[in-house]
C-alpha cells in the first residue's frame, strides 16, 4: 500500500452540514472562496498518496427502501479510508455533487463547482453543453459549463484507488406499462403517496412546507393535515414583476381552510443581485430560481424538516406532455425530437445566443446543440412516457433539484415524497393516455381530500404586473458593473452596454431589454480569468 501524507490541509467530520452564507454585495471580479463548501482531493505521486479537504462528508437524507439494494432518500456522500475514495448518491442523482479528474490521475469531488475551480479544475468551457443549456435552460446528462467538470451520475458507482477511477451511473430499468383503469390508477396513487409520506414524517423539530398554488406541495400539505402532522408553518414567496403572483394568494387560501399559519415573504434583493447570487448557489447550472432566494432565506437555519414536491408534476401532470411532443418522441426521429425541444425556448434563447463570441461563439451553432442533445434523447425512446422520462432525468434532476438541494441549507431533511422508489416506479409505468388530459393529479387530490376540492389552483391567467421600475433598476445596476469592466472575451460588448447607457441617460424612462444571461456569461468569464 502506498504511503499516505496530507496535501495542503486535511480535516474530517461525520456528515458535516453544507453551509454557504448569503452575500448581497456584488463584486464583479470577486475571487472569494465559495462559502467554505467542502471538498476532497486525492492524488498519487510515485508511491505517495497526497490528500486535502474532508475525508468524509454526507449531505441530504437517506431512508430505508423496500428494495434493500437501493437506499431511498435524496443524498450524496463520500468516504476516504486511507487508500480508496468511494462516492455514493441517491437513485436519481438529485443531490448535486461534482467532480473532475486531475492530469496526474487524481480526482477531486465537491458540491461546489467554484471550489473545484479553486482546486485546479481545467477551465475550458464545454461549448457543446452550453449550446444545449442556452437553448433549453438546463444541462443534460452530467454536463456542466466546464468540459472537465461533471455531475456525479445517478446511483453512481464511483470509486478511486491507485490512480484508477471507476465512474458510471445506474438508471432504473425501463418500466413495463401498467394497464390500470383510471380509477384503479388514482386509488393506487393515493395509497402509494400516503405510504411514501408515512416514511417521511417530521420528527420533534420544527417543520416547514414551502407552498405554491400548484398540485405537488398541496398534495404534501393535505396528507400531513390528514395524518395529524401539520407543519409549524407554510411559506410562499412573492416573485418579482411581471409575475402576477397568484401562487401566494392561493397558498394563503388553502392554509386558511386548514387553519394553518402561512407566511408570505417578499423579494429582498433586486433582480440583478438575485440573479448574481442565484447563479452561484446553483453552481451555474440553471437560469431559474432567483425568486427562490426569498423563500430559502426565510427557511434556512430556522427549521429541522422541510418538504419539496420535486417530481410530482413531471410524473403525474406535466405541462411538457402534449400530443405533439408525445408524437414526435414516439416517431424515434431523434433530430426532429431535438428540434422540437429547442423550438420551445427559441425566442428567448435567440437574444442570448446573439451575444456570444470568442470561445463561446461555437455555441451559437444549433447543429452542435442537436449533436449533444441527441445522445441524451436516445436514452428515453423506449420509455412508456418518453417525454416525461427525458424531462425528469434532465430538467428535473439537473435544474429543478437545485432549489431544494442547493439553496435550502442547514436543515436535517428536505423530504421529496414523489421520489419514493415505489411511487416513482408506479407513476413511471402509467400509459400516457392517463396523463394527457392534465387532470390525473387534480382528480387524485380531489378524491383523497374531498373537503378541500373546491380550492382552486393557480392558473397564471392574471394580468402581468408592470416591471418598468424593476427593469430600470436592473439596467442601472448592470451599467454600474459593466461600464467599468474590461471588454469581454466571450460576450459582445457594444449592444448590451449601449442599452444600459440609454436607460441611465434617460433616467429610467427608456428601458431597452437586456437579458439576465449577461450576468451568467460574465460570471463564467470571471472564473476563466482566475
Image (cartoon, helix red, strand yellow):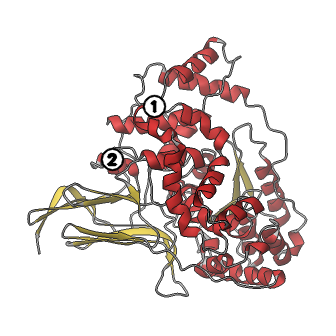
To which quarter of the image does residue 323 belong?
Answer: bottom right
Q: Which residue is mark 1?
A: 357
Q: Position of residue 131 (x, y in %)?
A: 50, 45
| Residue 2: quadrant of the picture | bottom left
Q: Compared with residue 352, is residue 62 higher up or lower down, i.e. above or below?
A: below
User: Alpha-carbon distance for marks 2 and 1?
Assistant: 23 Å
Q: Nearer the viewer, residue 254 or 360?
A: 360
Q: Nearer the viewer, residue 274 or 524?
A: 524
The residue at which mark 2 appears reads as 117
The answer to whether residue 135 is visible is yes
Badge 1 local density, few (<14 within 10 Å), some, or many (20+)? some
- Above or below residue 456? Residue 466 is above
SS of the residue at dot 1? loop
On the rendered structure, is 450 left or right of 21?
right
Horizontal and vertical percent for residue 80? 27, 70
Q: Is residue 365 above or below residue 36?
A: above
Q: Position of residue 365 (x, y in %)?
A: 51, 41
The residue most toward the right is 454
Name the residue at 65% across, 27% down.
513
Q: Is residue 122 left or right of residue 350?
A: left
**Residue 21 is at least partly visible in this image:** no
Amino acid at each position: 500500500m502506498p504511503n499516505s501524507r496530507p496535501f495542503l490541509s486535511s480535516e474530517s467530520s461525520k456528515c458535516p452540514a453544507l453551509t454557504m452564507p448569503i452575500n448581497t454585495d456584488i463584486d464583479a471580479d470577486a475571487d472569494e472562496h465559495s462559502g467554505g463548501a467542502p471538498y476532497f482531493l486525492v492524488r498519487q505521486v510515485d508511491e505517495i498518496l497526497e490528500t486535502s479537504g474532508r475525508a468524509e462528508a454526507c449531505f441530504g437524507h437517506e431512508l430505508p427502501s423496500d428494495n434493500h439494494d437501493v437506499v431511498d432518500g435524496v443524498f450524496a456522500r463520500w468516504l476516504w479510508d486511507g487508500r480508496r475514495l468511494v462516492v455514493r448518491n441517491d437513485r436519481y442523482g438529485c443531490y448535486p455533487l461534482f467532480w473532475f479528474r486531475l492530469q496526474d490521475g487524481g480526482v477531486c469531488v465537491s458540491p461546489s463547482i467554484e471550489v473545484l475551480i479553486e482546486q485546479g479544475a481545467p477551465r475550458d468551457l464545454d461549448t457543446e453543453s452550453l449550446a444545449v443549456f442556452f437553448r433549453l435552460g438546463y444541462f443534460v446528462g452530467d454536463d456542466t459549463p466546464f468540459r472537465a467538470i461533471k455531475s456525479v451520475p445517478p446511483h453512481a458507482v464511483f470509486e478511486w484507488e491507485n490512480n484508477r477511477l471507476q465512474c458510471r451511473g445506474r438508471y432504473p430499468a425501463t418500466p413495463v406499462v401498467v394497464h390500470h383503469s383510471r380509477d384503479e390508477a388514482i386509488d393506487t396513487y393515493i395509497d402509494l403517496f400516503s405510504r411514501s409520506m408515512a416514511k417521511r414524517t417530521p420528527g420533534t423539530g420544527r417543520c416547514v412546507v414551502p407552498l405554491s398554488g400548484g398540485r405537488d406541495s398541496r398534495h404534501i400539505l393535505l396528507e400531513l393535515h390528514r395524518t395529524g402532522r401539520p407543519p409549524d408553518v407554510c411559506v410562499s414567496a412573492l416573485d418579482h414583476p411581471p409575475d402576477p403572483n397568484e401562487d401566494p394568494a392561493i397558498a394563503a387560501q388553502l392554509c386558511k381552510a386548514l387553519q394553518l399559519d402561512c407566511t408570505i415573504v417578499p423579494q429582498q434583493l433586486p433582480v440583478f443581485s438575485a440573479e448574481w447570487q442565484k447563479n452561484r448557489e446553483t453552481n451555474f447550472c440553471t437560469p431559474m430560481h432567483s425568486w427562490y432566494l426569498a423563500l430559502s432565506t426565510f427557511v434556512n437555519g430556522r427549521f429541522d424538516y422541510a418538504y419539496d414536491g420535486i417530481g410530482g408534476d413531471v410524473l403525474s401532470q406535466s405541462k411538457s406532455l402534449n400530443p405533439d411532443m408525445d408524437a414526435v418522441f414516439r416517431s424515434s426521429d431523434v433530430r426532429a425530437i431535438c428540434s422540437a425541444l429547442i423550438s420551445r425556448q427559441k425566442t428567448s434563447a435567440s437574444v442570448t445566443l446573439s451575444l456570444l463570441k470568442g470561445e463561446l461563439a461555437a455555441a451559437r451553432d444549433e447543429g452542435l446543440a442537436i449533436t449533444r442533445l441527441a445522445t441524451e434523447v436516445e436514452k428515453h425512446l423506449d420509455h412508456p412516457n418518453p417525454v416525461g422520462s427525458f424531462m425528469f432525468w434532465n430538467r428535473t434532476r439537473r435544474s429543478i433539484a437545485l432549489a431544494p438541494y442547493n439553496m435550502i441549507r442547514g436543515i436535517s431533511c428536505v423530504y421529496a415524497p414523489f421520489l419514493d422508489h415505489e411511487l416513482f416506479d408506479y407513476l413511471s409505468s402509467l400509459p400516457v393516455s392517463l396523463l394527457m388530459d392534465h387532470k390525473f393529479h387534480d382528480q387524485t387530490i380531489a378524491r383523497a381530500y374531498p373537503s378541500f376540492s373546491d380550492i382552486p389552483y393557480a392558473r397564471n391567467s392574471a394580468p402581468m404586473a408592470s416591471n418598468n421600475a424593476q427593469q430600470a433598476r436592473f439596467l442601472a445596476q448592470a451599467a454600474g458593473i459593466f461600464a467599468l469592466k474590461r471588454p469581454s472575451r466571450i460576450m459582445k460588448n457594444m449592444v448590451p452596454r449601449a442599452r444600459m447607457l440609454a436607460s441611465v441617460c434617460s433616467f429610467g424612462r427608456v428601458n431597452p431589454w437586456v437579458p439576465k444571461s449577461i450576468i451568467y456569461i460574465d460570471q463564467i468569464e470571471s472564473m476563466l480569468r482566475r
